[in-house]
Image (cartoon, grey):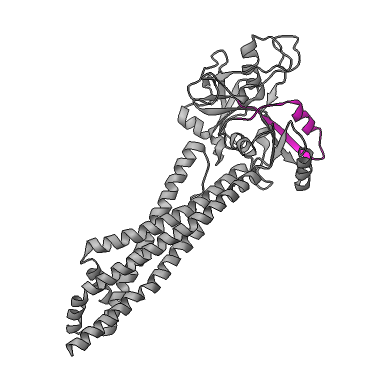
């Protein structure tokens, strides 16, 4: 009965109650969103780097290198000769696998990745399945055969047996290589990462597009053959054909944009890294380490926005409590009527306490739902735009934050009760 009276009296003034709930909900939602985004984005980015234990590429920004190679974003750095791959493969005591990657073209904005069939054997860890698994069809085994990611298949409508033309650069509207059609021979299963938006083909296809396709089958020696996208040269297009060929059919080895390395072990990875410390023509990076460094930089910013988040919650609590106090004073007449009808002082306190608890708890719950729902929306958008998979699982920190808001709010909710007690006592003294 007391609960019913408290609930009905609370909604006797719907505008005030709705305002209280809205203020509380928005403060909690903002805090939950920030906490969930930080946690989810970090887990999503680190998960995307798991197949890339080590990367070797030309000197430059390590962040740009990782963004391009792992996340298929940003512009590629310059290229390395294929001899770098051969040299790494000869270090059998240190290197288990060395797989070249070559970038430069795209299909409707999706990156074309030239590589070798060994990429389909990579596992993020020994107890996990292959990173790139064929859902339909087969891996490529000849030039101008392609295996497309799940998102590419959905957005382009391509299926096994279809053909397409690649375009220069990464823009959806580039100049097409209409003399070199690709044939889709396989579809990738969901990778839960950026390579859902990749088009994998043999590295010879990339070399052929940027060498033979623009030199009319005339062999070149260490010459950079550049292509442009909208007249803007990119480093990824400087893929060269080296050596001499005796016939138009001979395929000379060209350059690579990056080299994926699976080391023999943890210690061997750091031994490899030491070999590149003093090199001016190449760099070796740990992608997971680069992402961690980025989050450390974000952590410095976190020290700034965390107090702001706590301040918002504190202000929301203050607004709720002040409004609850004013609402309590406005209801003194109602409480006097209830007391005249036989309600005890304890029951009146219970009604007031339950009303404050309803506002704090319901506002915090609505805020958590709103904040986590917004996080899921951003995660979906980020997955669709960049294929970065942010886990939809509940963040423990967001739950703890919401519960903390409820506990603190209920504790401070005793203040209106104390204020009511004083006002009620004053009225009692006046009446007597």
Looking at the image, the residue that sits furthest to the bottom is 432
Query: Going 72% across and 39% down the picture, which residue do you hit?
Result: 262
The quarter in which the C terminus is drawn is bottom left
User: Is residue 293 toward the left or the right of residue 221 in the image?
Assistant: left
State the image coordinates of residue 84 (x, y, percent, origin top left).
75, 29
User: Is residue 40 toward the left or the right of residue 216 in the image?
Assistant: left
Q: Nearer the viewer, residue 426 or 352?
A: 426
Q: Which residues are magenta?
A: 76-103
Residue 225's quadrant in the figure? top right
Residue 198's quadrant in the figure? top right
Q: Is residue 415 above or below residue 308?
A: below
Q: Nearer the viewer, residue 281 or 359?
A: 281
Q: Is residue 8 above or below residue 365?
A: below
Query: Going 47% across and 38% down the picture, which residue do you hit?
Result: 384
Q: Is residue 122 above or below residue 168?
A: below
Examine the rendering and report whether any part of residue 352 can be seen: yes
The quarter in which the N terminus is drawn is bottom left
State the image coordinates of residue 312 (x, y, percent, origin top left).
41, 59
Query: Going 17% across and 87% down the picture, which residue do you hit?
Result: 431
């Amino acid at each position: 009965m007391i609960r019913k009276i408290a609930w009905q009296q609370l909604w006797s003034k719907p505008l005030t109650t709705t305002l209280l709930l809205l203020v509380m909900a928005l403060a909690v939602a903002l805090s939950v969103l920030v906490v969930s985004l930080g946690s989810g984005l970090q887990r999503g980015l680190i998960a995307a780097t798991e197949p890339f234990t080590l990367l070797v590429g030309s000197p430059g920004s390590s962040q740009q290198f990782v963004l391009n190679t792992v996340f298929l974003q940003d512009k590629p750095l310059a290229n390395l000769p294929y001899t770098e791959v051969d040299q790494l493969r000869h270090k059998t005591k240190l290197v288990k696998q060395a797989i070249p990657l070559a970038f430069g073209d795209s299909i409707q904005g999706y990156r074309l990745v030239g590589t070798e069939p060994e990429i389909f054997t990579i596992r993020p860890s020994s107890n996990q399945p292959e990173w790139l698994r064929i859902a339909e069809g087969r891996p490529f085994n000849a030039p101008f055969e392609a295996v497309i990611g799940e998102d590419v298949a959905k957005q382009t409508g391509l299926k096994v047996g279809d053909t397409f033309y690649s375009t220069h650069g990464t823009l959806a509207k580039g100049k097409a290589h209409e003399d070199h059609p690709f044939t889709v021979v396989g579809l990738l299963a969901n990778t839960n990462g950026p390579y859902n938006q990749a088009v994998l083909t043999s590295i010879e296809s990339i070399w052929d597009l940027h060498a033979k396709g623009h030199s009319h089958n005339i062999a070149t020696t260490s010459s950079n053959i550049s292509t442009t996208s909208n007249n803007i040269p990119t480093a990824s297009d400087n893929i060269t054909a080296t050596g001499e060929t005796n016939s138009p059919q001979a395929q000379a080895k060209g350059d690579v944009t990056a080299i994926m390395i699976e080391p023999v072990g943890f210690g061997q990875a750091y031994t490899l890294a030491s070999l590149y410390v003093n090199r001016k023509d190449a760099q070796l990076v740990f992608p997971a380490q680069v992402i961690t460094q980025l989050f450390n930089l974000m952590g410095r910013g976190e020290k700034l926005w965390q107090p702001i988040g706590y301040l918002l919650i504190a202000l929301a609590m203050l607004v709720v409590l002040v409004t609850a106090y004013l609402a309590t004073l406005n209801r003194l007449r109602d409480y006097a009527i209830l007391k005249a009808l036989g309600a005890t002082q304890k029951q009146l306190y219970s009604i007031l306490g339950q009303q404050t608890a309803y506002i704090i708890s319901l506002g915090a719950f609505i805020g958590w739902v709103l904040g986590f729902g917004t996080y899921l929306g951003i995660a979906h958008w980020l997955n669709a735009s960049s294929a970065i998979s942010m886990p939809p699982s509940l963040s423990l920190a967001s739950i703890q934050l919401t519960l903390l808001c409820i506990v603190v709010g209920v504790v401070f909710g005793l203040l209106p009760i104390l204020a009511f007690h004083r006002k009620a006592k004053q009225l009692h003294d006046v009446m007597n």
